[in-house]
Image (tube, rainbow, N blue to C red):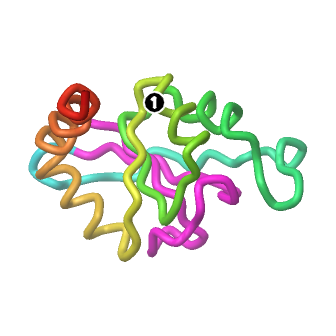
Amino acid sequence: MAKVAVASTDGVSINEHFGRAKEFWIYEVNEQGTYHLLERREVLPAIRTDHKHTAGYAAELLDDIEAVLIARIGPQAEVELLSKGVFALEITGPVDKALVSYGKRGKYIRSKLVRSPVEGS
């Protein structure tokens, strides 16, 4: 089982930029592609400024997650997440299809992401 966060304004589509997300939908996903919603984590209004929040705060908020599915993410936020062992995957479209796909392909995705920096060296 993997815990996956989704940046979405409606819980239907992955349509939110990581730095602008007001909340993250947290799912538990298994290798067969089934999933269920665990919770919604709100980014506290006091943390957001100019419709953005700090990458460090969001990384702390998601430090128990395996992967974050977002429409866009900046390089600093991605580094912050990686420092917590969380992978960011830029993807748009329906949440349900993305979660099923991640569940079935998560091991492969993780193996490629873990090896990528070494292969580039």
Range covered by the magenta-colored residues: 1-29
**Image quadrant in which you'd find residue 65:** top left
Pinpoint residue 9: horizontal percent, then vertical percent: 60, 70
Q: Secondary structure at mark 1?
A: helix
Tell me: 3 left or right of 42.
left
What residue do we see at 52% from left, 27% from top?
63
Residue 66 colored magenta?
Answer: no
What residue do we see at 16% from left, 54% from top?
33
Mark 1 surroundings within 10 Å by alpha-carbon count, few (fewer than 14), some (14 through 19), many (20 or more): some
Q: At label 1, which amino acid type do we have?
A: Leu
User: Relative to 59, is 20 above or below?
Assistant: below
User: Relative to 121, is 113 above or below?
Assistant: below
Question: How many labels, in total?
Answer: 1
User: Relative to 27, is 15 above or below?
Assistant: below
What residue do we see at 24% from left, 34% from top?
120
Residue identified by numbered label 1: 82
Tell me: 32 left or right of 63.
left
